[in-house]
Image (cartoon, rainbow, N blue to C red):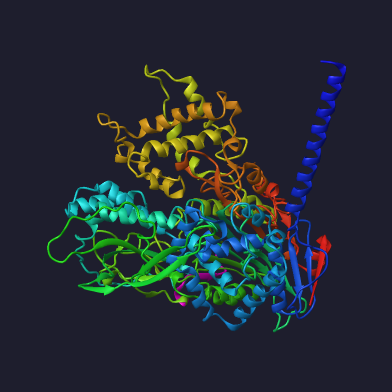
Amino acid sequence: MSRRGGSRARRATIAIAALLVVLLVGVSIFTFVTVRRPLPQTDGTLTVPGLDGEVSVLRDAQGVPQIYADTPEDLFRAQGYVQAQDRFFEMDYRRHVTSGRLAELVGDSKEAIDADKVTRTFGWRLVAEEEWKIIAPETKAYLQAYADGVNAYLEDRDPSEIALEYTVLGTSVSVADPEPWDPIDSLAWLKAMAWDLRGNYDDELERAIAYGSFAGTATGTEDPARVAQDVARVATLFPAYVSDTNLPVLDPAEVPTATAPAEVDVEDVEQTSYMPTLAGSELQSAVGAADRALAAVPVLVGRGEGTGSNSWAVSGEHTESGKPLLANDPHLALQAPGVWAQVGLHCNTLSSSCGFDVAGFSFAGFPGVIIGHNADVAWGLTNMGADVTDFFIERVRDETYLRGDDWVPLETRTETIKVNGGQDVELEVSSTLHGPIVSTVLPLDRVAEAPTEGTPLGDYEVALQWTALEPGRTADAVFAFDLAASADDMREAAALFEVPAQNVVFATTDGHIGYQAPGKIPVRQVVEGPVPSDGTWPRPGWDERFDWTGYVPAKQMPGVVDPEEGFIVAANQAVLPAGTTPFLTTDWDYGYRSQRIRTLLQSEIDSGRKIDVEMMNTIQNDDWSPFADALLPSLLDQDIENSKGVRNDFAAEGQDLLTDWDRSMDMDSAAAAYFAAVWRNLLEITFWDDLPEDIRPAGGSRWLAVVQNMLLDETNAFWDDRQTVSVVETRDEVLNQALVSARLDLTTELSKKTTDWEWGKLHTLSLGHLVLDNDAVPGFVRSYMNPRTVSMPGGSSIVNATSWDAASGNFEVTSGPSMRMVVDLDDLDSSTWVTVTGASGHPASKHYEDQLGTWAAGETYAWPFSVSAVAAQTKDELRLVP
């Protein structure tokens, strides 16, 4: 090449490079402007239509707003404005889900349309509209003020100024200006919260599916002995709660309403037309269709394995300050942004007309504080798990269903689902007196029943009865908690908190601690038959003896103030021992977390050490495994040998790690990694051959209780692998196989050297965006919207409950402490808090995930409350003026 030619080539290269630089700079500027455009103004002055007076919004280093106003309406108007600033897309997404309009937002997606079908069938929005008619006038005023604040922020802003998500969605669907916020949008959100925390419906369906699997779908037998045998085998997968080992929340002796159940006349009911058919193909397909439909609703708060919480209160006699301490950490689905929005709400001058002085954790989309403290009371919530749902097997023929000997008309309505960029979808919703029929929403291939002589009995369908499908006053309860000043106030507020049924643990600045069980709890008649009639199994809808007969009166719900032992622990375990009333459920968490918390508290008390905020935080991060404590003796008792009866040194290297292990699931622990793999493999080897894929063990507390019982029976039928026809496996063979296979698996998954193994390399948390975390979204967008992956300690049914799903085959965190708080009732400014992501829902904000590292490390932030403490930590001050 000539010198001139080379020079020309170089000039061309430089020109191309320069053009690329210009293009890259242009893209960078565009990207910078696009992603930062929605970031809100957090200092200076803004005019907000509708305010009666000036409002101050003070934000700390984490961007958490503390709001000060002269009236409650201005307070909640400002809360609506600020939460729309920070998190409107999250709010908009939730209201589309709860009203069955997700396809209007995200487009022609099968998953979105399916979700809309199920939500429309439930009729959440319709129930919320009915609730608006019965809530207190002041609650209506607060909800309306909140909506006005949201709409003041939305006015004159196009979607790209509100949230980056609208810009991304706009590349594939039409994005219009968001509709004004309506108070009903807030009420409907309570239905989603109730749905995810609804109790034992998963267990109820699992029992029916397991029964069909054990009985066989082609037996057709009505032999009572065979039915009893199959029911008993199902029962082994749902062991009774052992309340003398893992203590209930309350001692019945201290609870006046906790009494032995009254004598009930039981009837011997012939269910031969129901139970054997529960194993038949037609009804199993209906149950499967119901299960599929209910799984289509997006997870908004958290559900399934790992969904629970820890809370406890310690009286002043055991604390350093002499005043109570309270801790709470709800275990929910972990996503970006996190479900909680931290906030403080303060009336400038406290009076009968403006009494709010409260801080804590709210839901973006609903005014007030859900969990937190005011100047007098602190409270935490944990899921009670009460049985508030029942599935009714209905006989449906044409437009009627069977009740006794009569066919009565179904209630029907037509819903139209709008699809962004697609055709409208018409949905016919049918309901019985029990509730909506859910088995026809997303039907599977249905198996027709064999013809019968005489009058056809129609098709089997499944209807859902659920307390949250009736209008209630939970919205009133939120503000009653925020304004409570005493233990009596807390009990009265709890009586309004109808759904979801929660454990309320509270403490007061004047020295009291207490517990109250709220909730709308169905009363069921006791009916003798092949299966329990307590709500743990689907019920025959044609037999009125299985109908609900009312609800437990609020005054009969168990509660206590200042129990004798000086502390209260509510971590999803049984509230009262079996055999006491009111009956709440039998499907509790099995109490390993709660008992560990009790043990740690009692250890401090017995040692004479006084408990402080630091110790409460330490307990919240406890990683000790009850699984290891229960299984290690049996695992260490195994001789790992080769086929010649000689010790298999390579395989035994894993087992050797367990010998001196302290049973803590620490991130850097090789033994913890190996034990988790053993547990995963043990469940697979033991149960996968017996259970359908949809109900394989996730590995939580119930499965530990099942395996503990089985360890006492070395020839239990579940130990045997049904696929090895000529061999009958026993307990020790299965345990040995789990140990060996775990060693081989971690050799592949981590390293051949056990010294390279660490639990944190396997047990990681990858937070996904609410909407933009799927394969249809470009990878660079997902990477930008999703926070970084972090390694985690802890595990399922551990106090630091970073749960994982054993059925999935991996150890990724599926749920965990969505926030942690400790409240010091002696000095509220000494309290601590943290949430999983951050205060902002905007990925360009420094507060989108700035709390993630602190949360993952088990650390917390100072939680200012007093005017002086808030002022000392203020980084930004925004004045909202009329």
Q: Compared with residue 98, is residue 734 higher up or lower down, i.e. above or below?
A: above
Question: 730 or 805, which lies in front?
Answer: 805
Q: Quadrant of the C terminus?
A: bottom right
Residue shown at 54% from the left, 50% from the top:
596
**Residue 279 can be seen in this image:** no
Picture coordinates of residue 354 (x, y %)? Answer: 71, 80
Front position in the image: 594 or 379: 379
In this rendering, is residue 433 above or below 301? below
Q: Position of residue 739 (x, y in %)?
A: 45, 30
Q: Image quarter for residue 737?
A: top left
Is 669 in front, or is 176? 176
Task: Locate residue 337: give its quadrant.
Answer: bottom right
**Residue 487 pos. (x, y %):** 59, 74
Q: Quadrant of residue 117?
A: bottom left
The quarter in which the N terminus is drawn is top right
Tell me which residue sits at (48%, 63%) in the image: 195
Indicate yes or no whether the magenta region holds residue 98: no
Across and down, in percent, residue 807 comes to: 44, 42
- Please state if 862 lies on the left or on the right of 521 as rendered: right
- Say if 76 sits above or below 777 in the image: below
Magenta range: 555-564
Which residue is located at x 64 percent, y 47 percent?
A: 786
Q: Is residue 312 left or right of residue 498?
A: right
